[in-house]
Amino acid sequence: MNEPSSSSSLSDPTAVAVELERLRGTVEAGFARVDGSLALLVQRSDQTDRQLADHEKRLDALERGRWPLASVGALAAVATVAVTTWQLTAR
């Protein structure tokens, strides 16, 4: 940043106006960069939300399609009793 070399340039309205315009341009460019970065972050957040919703749906479908372990154990016990009863009566 160029500093004024003398105090006389501070009282010159043209020099002050030029410096203010240059500062305005710098601030606008900075805001444009920040705005672009925020837009990118919002887009990535939206993508992440969609991915999370998709994973939730897929996980729910998997959970509905699985057999609970207790049910499998009960079926195995019933099958064992049935086979044992059949073997005892077949003799």
Image: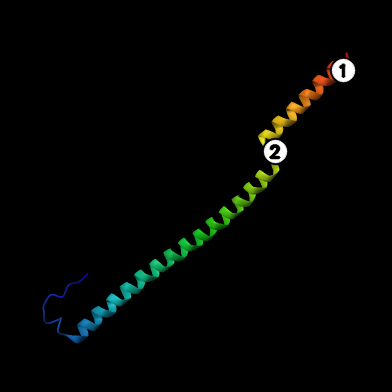
Q: Which residue is drawn at 66% across and 34% down?
A: 69
Q: Where does the image place residue 56, in percent across and percent down from the top left?
A: 60, 51
Q: Residue at x 70, y 43 (%)?
A: 65
On the image, which quarter does residue 34 sit in?
A: bottom left
Residue named by callout 1? 89
Residue named by callout 2? 67
On the image, which quarter does residue 23 sit in?
A: bottom left
* Crowd tier of the residue under label 1, counting other residues whose Cα lies within 10 Å: few below 14, some 14–19, many 20 or above: few
Report the side of 74 relative to 43 (left or right).
right
Q: Which amino acid does label 1 sit on?
A: Thr
Tell which of 28 and 79 is nearer to you.
Answer: 79
Q: Which of marks 1 and 2 is in front?
A: 1
Image quadrant in which the C terminus is located = top right
The mark nearer the N terminus, 1 or 2, is: 2
In what element is the residue under mark 2? loop
Q: What residue type is labelled 2?
A: Trp
